[in-house]
Image: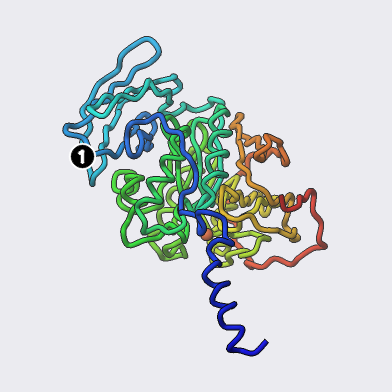
Amino acid sequence: MSAHRALPLILALVAAAPACFPKGWPPPEAPLYLERTSPFDVGPYLVMLAPGRMAVVLEHDLPEPPRISWRTATTPLGERTALEIDGLWVATLEGLPLDEPLSYQVSSAAGNVGPVAFRAGRSRGQRFSFAAFGDTRTGHDVHRALVAAMAQEPVELVVHSGDLVETGGVAAQWALFLQIEEPLMAGRPLLAAVGNHDNSQRLHYRRYFLADAVAEGNRYFYQDWGDLRVIIMDSEVEARRGSEQYAFLEAALRDGAAKDMIMVLSLHYPPYSSGAHGSTLELREVLGELAPRYGVELVLAGHDHNYERTKRIDGVTYMVAASGGAPIRRVRPSWFSAAVRTEPHFVIFDVDKKSLVGRAVNLDGETFDSFVIPPNPPRPDFELESVVPPAPARRVATSGGVR
Ligand SMILES: [Fe+2]
Protein backbone atom coordinates (compact mmCIF):
# COMPACT_ATOMS: atom_id res chain seq x y z
CA MET A 1 0.00 0.00 0.00
CA SER A 2 1.39 3.41 -0.97
CA ALA A 3 1.91 6.05 1.69
CA HIS A 4 -0.90 8.37 0.51
CA ARG A 5 -3.42 5.49 0.42
CA ALA A 6 -2.35 4.28 3.89
CA LEU A 7 -2.77 7.70 5.53
CA PRO A 8 -6.59 7.60 6.00
CA LEU A 9 -6.31 4.15 7.57
CA ILE A 10 -3.62 5.34 10.00
CA LEU A 11 -5.73 8.38 10.95
CA ALA A 12 -8.78 6.16 11.53
CA LEU A 13 -6.76 3.85 13.79
CA VAL A 14 -5.43 6.80 15.80
CA ALA A 15 -8.97 8.19 16.20
CA ALA A 16 -10.21 4.79 17.41
CA ALA A 17 -7.27 4.23 19.78
CA PRO A 18 -8.98 5.42 23.01
CA ALA A 19 -11.64 2.75 22.49
CA CYS A 20 -8.89 0.12 22.60
CA PHE A 21 -8.09 0.96 26.20
CA PRO A 22 -10.24 0.04 29.19
CA LYS A 23 -12.63 2.73 30.33
CA GLY A 24 -10.99 5.02 32.87
CA TRP A 25 -7.48 4.55 31.51
CA PRO A 26 -5.06 5.81 32.74
CA PRO A 27 -6.27 4.88 36.24
CA PRO A 28 -6.77 7.69 38.75
CA GLU A 29 -4.24 7.98 41.55
CA ALA A 30 -6.53 6.49 44.18
CA PRO A 31 -8.79 3.94 42.49
CA LEU A 32 -9.92 2.24 45.65
CA TYR A 33 -13.26 2.53 47.34
CA LEU A 34 -12.44 3.35 50.90
CA GLU A 35 -15.15 2.57 53.37
CA ARG A 36 -14.67 4.97 56.25
CA THR A 37 -16.69 5.50 59.36
CA SER A 38 -15.00 8.72 60.47
CA PRO A 39 -16.77 11.99 59.64
CA PHE A 40 -13.42 13.80 59.42
CA ASP A 41 -11.21 14.36 56.39
CA VAL A 42 -8.35 12.66 58.26
CA GLY A 43 -8.32 10.84 61.57
CA PRO A 44 -8.72 10.66 64.43
CA TYR A 45 -5.35 8.95 64.83
CA LEU A 46 -2.86 8.60 67.67
CA VAL A 47 0.64 10.05 67.86
CA MET A 48 2.77 8.78 70.73
CA LEU A 49 4.53 11.62 72.55
CA ALA A 50 5.91 9.52 75.42
CA PRO A 51 4.79 6.55 77.52
CA GLY A 52 1.57 7.71 79.19
CA ARG A 53 1.27 10.71 76.84
CA MET A 54 -0.64 10.49 73.56
CA ALA A 55 -1.96 13.02 71.08
CA VAL A 56 -5.29 12.49 69.34
CA VAL A 57 -5.09 14.18 65.93
CA LEU A 58 -7.66 14.93 63.25
CA GLU A 59 -8.02 17.19 60.22
CA HIS A 60 -11.33 18.78 59.29
CA ASP A 61 -12.82 22.20 58.70
CA LEU A 62 -14.85 22.72 61.89
CA PRO A 63 -16.63 25.85 63.18
CA GLU A 64 -15.32 25.18 66.66
CA PRO A 65 -12.69 22.89 68.18
CA PRO A 66 -13.63 19.26 68.79
CA ARG A 67 -13.78 17.90 72.34
CA ILE A 68 -11.92 14.76 73.32
CA SER A 69 -12.71 12.73 76.43
CA TRP A 70 -10.88 9.64 77.64
CA ARG A 71 -11.33 6.98 80.28
CA THR A 72 -10.44 3.56 81.61
CA ALA A 73 -13.03 0.78 81.42
CA THR A 74 -14.57 2.01 84.66
CA THR A 75 -13.42 5.59 85.27
CA PRO A 76 -13.52 8.85 83.29
CA LEU A 77 -9.99 10.33 83.23
CA GLY A 78 -10.32 13.64 81.43
CA GLU A 79 -11.81 15.86 78.77
CA ARG A 80 -10.13 18.49 76.65
CA THR A 81 -10.75 20.88 73.78
CA ALA A 82 -8.39 20.24 70.88
CA LEU A 83 -5.95 22.94 69.86
CA GLU A 84 -5.45 23.95 66.25
CA ILE A 85 -1.83 23.32 65.29
CA ASP A 86 -0.77 23.86 61.69
CA GLY A 87 -4.26 23.08 60.36
CA LEU A 88 -4.69 19.96 62.50
CA TRP A 89 -6.82 19.51 65.61
CA VAL A 90 -4.60 18.11 68.36
CA ALA A 91 -5.56 17.05 71.89
CA THR A 92 -2.80 15.90 74.22
CA LEU A 93 -3.83 13.20 76.70
CA GLU A 94 -1.38 13.22 79.62
CA GLY A 95 -0.80 11.21 82.76
CA LEU A 96 -2.34 8.12 81.21
CA PRO A 97 -1.97 4.85 83.13
CA LEU A 98 0.24 2.20 81.53
CA ASP A 99 -0.87 -1.43 81.12
CA GLU A 100 -4.55 -0.53 81.12
CA PRO A 101 -7.11 -0.65 78.33
CA LEU A 102 -8.22 2.93 77.67
CA SER A 103 -10.61 4.58 75.25
CA TYR A 104 -11.26 8.05 73.86
CA GLN A 105 -14.20 9.75 72.23
CA VAL A 106 -14.28 12.75 69.90
CA SER A 107 -17.31 15.02 69.70
CA SER A 108 -17.61 17.79 67.12
CA ALA A 109 -20.03 19.70 64.93
CA ALA A 110 -19.22 17.29 62.07
CA GLY A 111 -20.01 14.20 64.11
CA ASN A 112 -18.71 11.99 66.88
CA VAL A 113 -16.18 9.16 66.92
CA GLY A 114 -15.62 6.52 69.53
CA PRO A 115 -15.14 5.08 71.96
CA VAL A 116 -11.81 4.09 70.37
CA ALA A 117 -9.77 1.54 72.36
CA PHE A 118 -6.08 2.27 72.89
CA ARG A 119 -3.20 1.85 75.28
CA ALA A 120 -0.72 4.46 76.40
CA GLY A 121 2.26 2.18 76.99
CA ARG A 122 3.53 -0.69 79.07
CA SER A 123 5.61 -0.96 82.20
CA ARG A 124 8.72 -3.15 82.35
CA GLY A 125 8.31 -6.91 82.21
CA GLN A 126 4.91 -6.87 80.45
CA ARG A 127 4.19 -9.03 77.42
CA PHE A 128 2.74 -7.38 74.33
CA SER A 129 2.92 -7.44 70.53
CA PHE A 130 3.76 -4.95 67.81
CA ALA A 131 3.66 -5.04 64.01
CA ALA A 132 6.10 -3.91 61.33
CA PHE A 133 5.78 -3.23 57.62
CA GLY A 134 6.89 -0.68 55.03
CA ASP A 135 6.84 0.75 51.50
CA THR A 136 3.10 1.30 51.10
CA ARG A 137 3.35 4.01 48.40
CA THR A 138 0.91 3.40 45.52
CA GLY A 139 -0.55 0.01 46.38
CA HIS A 140 -3.62 1.27 48.18
CA ASP A 141 -5.61 -1.95 47.97
CA VAL A 142 -2.69 -4.04 49.28
CA HIS A 143 -2.06 -1.43 51.97
CA ARG A 144 -5.70 -1.54 52.99
CA ALA A 145 -5.74 -5.35 53.14
CA LEU A 146 -2.58 -5.42 55.26
CA VAL A 147 -4.01 -2.81 57.62
CA ALA A 148 -7.20 -4.86 57.98
CA ALA A 149 -5.16 -7.98 58.77
CA MET A 150 -2.88 -6.20 61.25
CA ALA A 151 -5.90 -4.65 62.96
CA GLN A 152 -7.11 -8.20 63.74
CA GLU A 153 -3.87 -8.88 65.62
CA PRO A 154 -3.46 -7.85 69.26
CA VAL A 155 -0.72 -5.34 68.39
CA GLU A 156 -0.29 -2.24 70.51
CA LEU A 157 1.95 -0.22 68.23
CA VAL A 158 3.15 -0.39 64.62
CA VAL A 159 6.51 0.38 63.00
CA HIS A 160 6.64 1.57 59.36
CA SER A 161 10.08 1.53 57.73
CA GLY A 162 9.40 4.36 55.28
CA ASP A 163 8.06 5.27 51.83
CA LEU A 164 4.61 5.80 53.24
CA VAL A 165 3.57 7.70 50.09
CA GLU A 166 4.68 7.90 46.48
CA THR A 167 5.32 11.64 46.27
CA GLY A 168 6.07 13.27 49.59
CA GLY A 169 5.10 16.78 48.43
CA VAL A 170 1.50 15.87 47.59
CA ALA A 171 -0.73 16.51 50.62
CA ALA A 172 -3.57 14.34 49.24
CA GLN A 173 -1.33 11.28 49.34
CA TRP A 174 -0.62 11.76 53.04
CA ALA A 175 -4.33 12.20 53.70
CA LEU A 176 -5.07 9.00 51.80
CA PHE A 177 -2.31 7.13 53.65
CA LEU A 178 -3.79 8.18 56.98
CA GLN A 179 -7.34 7.33 55.88
CA ILE A 180 -6.24 3.81 54.91
CA GLU A 181 -4.39 3.52 58.22
CA GLU A 182 -7.43 4.51 60.30
CA PRO A 183 -8.35 0.98 61.47
CA LEU A 184 -4.86 0.73 62.95
CA MET A 185 -3.83 4.26 63.79
CA ALA A 186 -7.03 5.33 65.53
CA GLY A 187 -5.97 3.20 68.48
CA ARG A 188 -2.32 2.30 67.89
CA PRO A 189 0.53 4.74 67.39
CA LEU A 190 2.49 4.35 64.15
CA LEU A 191 6.22 4.94 64.58
CA ALA A 192 7.27 5.82 61.03
CA ALA A 193 10.71 6.19 59.53
CA VAL A 194 10.95 8.59 56.63
CA GLY A 195 11.72 7.13 53.20
CA ASN A 196 13.16 8.70 50.06
CA HIS A 197 9.65 8.99 48.56
CA ASP A 198 8.38 10.80 51.65
CA ASN A 199 10.92 13.58 51.44
CA SER A 200 9.56 17.01 50.59
CA GLN A 201 10.16 20.67 51.27
CA ARG A 202 6.46 20.81 52.16
CA LEU A 203 7.15 18.94 55.39
CA HIS A 204 3.99 16.85 55.40
CA TYR A 205 5.66 14.12 57.51
CA ARG A 206 6.65 16.72 60.08
CA ARG A 207 3.12 18.10 60.23
CA TYR A 208 1.08 14.88 60.35
CA PHE A 209 3.44 13.06 62.74
CA LEU A 210 3.83 16.07 65.05
CA ALA A 211 7.61 15.94 64.64
CA ASP A 212 8.02 19.26 66.47
CA ALA A 213 6.51 17.72 69.60
CA VAL A 214 7.91 14.21 69.15
CA ALA A 215 11.43 14.91 67.93
CA GLU A 216 12.12 18.66 68.12
CA GLY A 217 11.42 18.93 64.40
CA ASN A 218 13.72 16.06 63.46
CA ARG A 219 12.54 12.79 61.97
CA TYR A 220 14.67 10.64 64.26
CA PHE A 221 13.46 9.78 67.74
CA TYR A 222 12.80 6.87 70.04
CA GLN A 223 9.88 5.60 72.08
CA ASP A 224 9.82 3.05 74.90
CA TRP A 225 7.02 0.51 75.34
CA GLY A 226 7.64 -1.84 78.26
CA ASP A 227 11.00 -3.53 77.76
CA LEU A 228 11.13 -2.38 74.13
CA ARG A 229 12.94 0.68 72.80
CA VAL A 230 12.10 1.51 69.18
CA ILE A 231 14.59 3.91 67.64
CA ILE A 232 13.49 5.55 64.39
CA MET A 233 16.28 6.89 62.18
CA ASP A 234 16.11 9.34 59.29
CA SER A 235 18.17 7.86 56.46
CA GLU A 236 17.57 10.99 54.36
CA VAL A 237 19.96 13.02 56.53
CA GLU A 238 23.56 12.41 57.60
CA ALA A 239 24.05 9.65 60.17
CA ARG A 240 27.81 9.10 60.11
CA ARG A 241 30.10 9.77 63.04
CA GLY A 242 30.24 13.51 63.78
CA SER A 243 26.64 14.17 62.66
CA GLU A 244 23.81 15.24 64.95
CA GLN A 245 21.91 12.06 64.16
CA TYR A 246 24.90 9.91 65.11
CA ALA A 247 25.13 11.71 68.46
CA PHE A 248 21.39 11.19 69.02
CA LEU A 249 21.66 7.54 68.04
CA GLU A 250 24.61 6.76 70.26
CA ALA A 251 23.00 8.49 73.26
CA ALA A 252 19.72 6.60 72.71
CA LEU A 253 21.58 3.30 72.40
CA ARG A 254 23.82 3.90 75.41
CA ASP A 255 20.81 4.77 77.55
CA GLY A 256 18.84 1.79 76.23
CA ALA A 257 21.72 -0.58 76.94
CA ALA A 258 22.11 0.81 80.47
CA LYS A 259 18.39 0.14 81.05
CA ASP A 260 18.64 -3.37 79.56
CA MET A 261 16.02 -2.63 76.90
CA ILE A 262 15.24 -4.81 73.90
CA MET A 263 16.33 -2.51 71.10
CA VAL A 264 14.75 -2.35 67.66
CA LEU A 265 16.06 0.24 65.26
CA SER A 266 14.08 1.18 62.14
CA LEU A 267 15.20 3.14 59.10
CA HIS A 268 14.43 3.15 55.39
CA TYR A 269 17.69 2.21 53.67
CA PRO A 270 18.83 -1.32 54.60
CA PRO A 271 22.36 -1.91 55.90
CA TYR A 272 22.00 -5.50 54.63
CA SER A 273 19.76 -6.36 51.71
CA SER A 274 19.82 -8.89 48.89
CA GLY A 275 17.04 -7.01 47.06
CA ALA A 276 17.06 -4.86 43.94
CA HIS A 277 18.63 -1.80 45.61
CA GLY A 278 20.95 -3.84 47.80
CA SER A 279 22.83 -2.94 50.97
CA THR A 280 23.58 0.65 51.95
CA LEU A 281 27.20 0.40 53.03
CA GLU A 282 27.32 3.91 54.55
CA LEU A 283 24.66 2.85 57.03
CA ARG A 284 26.26 -0.55 57.53
CA GLU A 285 29.39 1.31 58.58
CA VAL A 286 27.42 3.18 61.27
CA LEU A 287 25.08 0.42 62.47
CA GLY A 288 27.49 -2.46 61.94
CA GLU A 289 29.51 -0.97 64.77
CA LEU A 290 26.96 0.72 67.05
CA ALA A 291 24.36 -2.07 66.97
CA PRO A 292 26.65 -4.82 68.35
CA ARG A 293 28.36 -2.42 70.74
CA TYR A 294 25.09 -1.45 72.43
CA GLY A 295 23.25 -4.72 71.90
CA VAL A 296 20.59 -3.87 69.31
CA GLU A 297 18.49 -6.98 68.70
CA LEU A 298 16.88 -6.02 65.38
CA VAL A 299 17.37 -3.49 62.57
CA LEU A 300 14.17 -3.09 60.51
CA ALA A 301 14.50 -1.52 57.07
CA GLY A 302 12.56 -0.94 53.85
CA HIS A 303 13.33 0.36 50.34
CA ASP A 304 13.68 -3.09 48.74
CA HIS A 305 10.14 -4.33 48.13
CA ASN A 306 10.62 -7.82 49.49
CA TYR A 307 11.07 -9.69 52.74
CA GLU A 308 14.46 -10.66 54.05
CA ARG A 309 15.68 -11.76 57.47
CA THR A 310 19.41 -12.13 57.88
CA LYS A 311 21.38 -14.50 60.02
CA ARG A 312 22.62 -12.83 63.14
CA ILE A 313 25.57 -10.66 62.14
CA ASP A 314 27.74 -9.80 65.15
CA GLY A 315 24.66 -10.64 67.23
CA VAL A 316 22.29 -8.36 65.24
CA THR A 317 19.39 -9.50 63.03
CA TYR A 318 18.74 -7.26 60.02
CA MET A 319 15.35 -7.37 58.35
CA VAL A 320 13.74 -5.85 55.26
CA ALA A 321 9.94 -6.01 55.58
CA ALA A 322 8.81 -3.77 52.79
CA SER A 323 6.04 -5.01 50.54
CA GLY A 324 3.22 -2.93 51.96
CA GLY A 325 1.79 -1.86 48.61
CA ALA A 326 4.74 -0.76 46.47
CA PRO A 327 5.42 -3.09 43.48
CA ILE A 328 6.92 -6.33 44.81
CA ARG A 329 10.32 -7.38 43.51
CA ARG A 330 12.22 -10.63 43.22
CA VAL A 331 15.00 -11.24 45.70
CA ARG A 332 17.83 -13.75 45.44
CA PRO A 333 19.44 -14.79 48.72
CA SER A 334 22.94 -13.69 49.67
CA TRP A 335 25.45 -15.20 52.05
CA PHE A 336 23.84 -13.30 54.94
CA SER A 337 20.21 -14.33 54.18
CA ALA A 338 18.31 -16.56 56.59
CA ALA A 339 14.96 -16.16 54.80
CA VAL A 340 13.76 -14.29 51.72
CA ARG A 341 10.30 -13.91 50.17
CA THR A 342 8.51 -11.87 47.54
CA GLU A 343 4.90 -11.08 48.36
CA PRO A 344 2.97 -8.46 50.36
CA HIS A 345 3.42 -9.05 54.06
CA PHE A 346 3.69 -7.70 57.57
CA VAL A 347 5.58 -9.00 60.59
CA ILE A 348 4.19 -9.55 64.08
CA PHE A 349 6.58 -9.48 67.04
CA ASP A 350 5.68 -10.76 70.49
CA VAL A 351 7.83 -9.20 73.17
CA ASP A 352 8.29 -12.05 75.61
CA LYS A 353 10.68 -11.45 78.46
CA LYS A 354 13.89 -10.52 76.68
CA SER A 355 13.19 -12.17 73.33
CA LEU A 356 11.38 -11.12 70.18
CA VAL A 357 9.21 -13.94 68.86
CA GLY A 358 8.42 -13.09 65.25
CA ARG A 359 6.29 -14.31 62.37
CA ALA A 360 6.02 -12.88 58.87
CA VAL A 361 2.47 -13.12 57.50
CA ASN A 362 1.14 -12.79 53.93
CA LEU A 363 -2.22 -11.60 52.63
CA ASP A 364 -3.66 -15.12 52.88
CA GLY A 365 -2.92 -15.07 56.59
CA GLU A 366 -0.16 -17.65 56.17
CA THR A 367 2.95 -17.40 58.30
CA PHE A 368 5.87 -17.92 55.90
CA ASP A 369 8.70 -17.23 58.33
CA SER A 370 8.83 -17.87 62.08
CA PHE A 371 11.81 -17.01 64.22
CA VAL A 372 13.03 -16.06 67.67
CA ILE A 373 15.50 -13.22 68.17
CA PRO A 374 17.24 -13.76 71.52
CA PRO A 375 18.74 -11.02 73.67
CA ASN A 376 21.88 -9.46 72.22
CA PRO A 377 24.17 -8.50 75.11
CA PRO A 378 26.14 -5.28 74.51
CA ARG A 379 29.79 -5.64 73.57
CA PRO A 380 31.27 -2.31 74.73
CA ASP A 381 34.64 -2.89 73.06
CA PHE A 382 33.21 -3.95 69.70
CA GLU A 383 34.85 -2.32 66.68
CA LEU A 384 33.86 -2.98 63.10
CA GLU A 385 36.78 -4.21 61.04
CA SER A 386 35.19 -3.92 57.62
CA VAL A 387 31.77 -3.07 56.19
CA VAL A 388 32.22 -5.89 53.68
CA PRO A 389 32.85 -9.10 55.64
CA PRO A 390 34.29 -12.07 53.70
CA ALA A 391 31.47 -14.01 52.06
CA PRO A 392 31.08 -17.65 53.06
CA ALA A 393 29.40 -20.16 50.72
CA ARG A 394 25.86 -19.23 49.62
CA ARG A 395 23.20 -20.88 51.70
CA VAL A 396 19.60 -19.97 52.46
CA ALA A 397 16.89 -21.36 54.69
CA THR A 398 13.73 -20.50 52.80
CA SER A 399 12.68 -18.71 49.65
CA GLY A 400 9.48 -17.86 47.87
CA GLY A 401 8.40 -17.02 44.37
CA VAL A 402 6.78 -13.89 43.01
CA ARG A 403 3.05 -13.94 43.59
FE1 LIG B 1 12.58 3.77 49.13
x and y, in percent, of residue 22 in the image:
57, 56
Instruction: Identify the residue shown where x is 59% and y is 32%.
Output: 351
x and y, in percent, of residue 107 in the image:
27, 24
Instruction: Identify the residue shown where x is 50% and y is 30%.
Output: 156
Instruction: Identify the residue shown where x is 62% and y is 36%.
Output: 356
x and y, in percent, of residue 155 in the image:
54, 30
The colour style of the image is rainbow
Q: Nearer the viewer, residue 181 or 312?
A: 181
Q: Nearer the viewer, residue 16 or 114?
A: 16
x and y, in percent, of residue 118 in the image:
43, 25
Observer able to see residue 386: yes
Side (left or right) of 51 relative to 145: left
Instruction: Identify the residue shown where x is 43% and y is 50%.
Output: 251
Q: Quarter holding the N terminus? A: bottom right
Residue under label 1: 84
| Picture quadrant of residue 190 | top left
Q: Nearer the viewer, residue 188 or 225?
A: 188
Q: Nearer the viewer, residue 103 or 14?
A: 14
